[in-house]
Amino acid sequence: MRWRPDGGSIWRRIPTDQVRRHSALAVVVLVGLVLGGYLLADAPAARAQSALQAEFELLNAPSGAQVLTREAGHKPGRASVGAEYQSPLSYAELRTFYDRELGRNSWRLSLDETLTDWGKDLGGHLACYRKADFWAGLQYAGNLARYGWDYGIDVTWGSSSCSGA
């Protein structure tokens, strides 16, 4: 506290209820600004999520593929819909199937690369497809992998493992 010639403190002159009222108002305004900013930033991702859901519903899975998990979500700058599957098909067979399946819906292949797990080659692959601002990623775990799933396919907007392709 600063010394004042009359011996009083500046804090003693401001009524406590007024300090509390102004502090509460400042907190409410701050929370409102943060929440409003988040909602404004999240709106494009929420719109993209709806379009991605529709795109994902157009995709068929190959015969014999079993859905293990399905996930969808969005946050500011990113939205995705996808699933993981068990399938007896090889990567070449899955690529052939999804090249046709995605191609009939105007998706175009933009990348096919091998994947490693901490430098170890388990036979994994990633194929990336593009349609406007959306990406589709077909990830094959590899014939030596033991992840509990054989392949996954995701359609995404914004940041994704394919967006650098």
Image: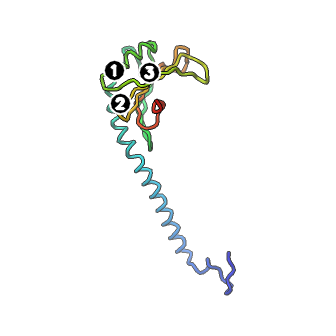
Near mark 1 (Cα within 10 A), the count class, few <14, some 14-19 or many ≥20, is some
Question: Secondary structure under badge 3?
Answer: strand
Q: Identify the residue at image location x=52%, y=74%.
A: 18
Residue 25 vertical placement versus 131 (above, below): below
| Label 1, label 3: how far apart the Cα atoms are | 16 Å
What amino acid is at disc 1?
Glu
Question: Secondary structure under badge 2?
Answer: strand
Q: Identify the residue at image location x=45%, y=12%.
A: 90
Near mark 2 (Cα within 10 A), the count class, few <14, some 14-19 or many ≥20, is some
Q: Return the x and y of residue 126 as percentages of the image width and height.
A: 48, 23
| Label 2, label 1: how far apart the Cα atoms are | 13 Å
Q: Earlier in the sequence, mark 2 or mark 3?
A: 3
What amino acid is at disc 2?
Lys
Q: Nearer the viewer, residue 90 or 96?
A: 96
Q: Which residue is mark 1?
A: 101
Q: Identify the residue at image location x=37%, y=35%.
A: 133
Quarter of the rendering containing residue 7: bottom right
Image label count: 3
Q: Which residue is mark 3?
A: 85
| Label 2, label 3: how far apart the Cα atoms are | 23 Å
- Is 4 on the left-hand or right-hand side of 76? right
What amino acid is at disc 3?
Tyr
Residue 55 vertical placement versus 150 (above, below): below
Q: Earlier in the sequence, mark 1 or mark 3?
A: 3
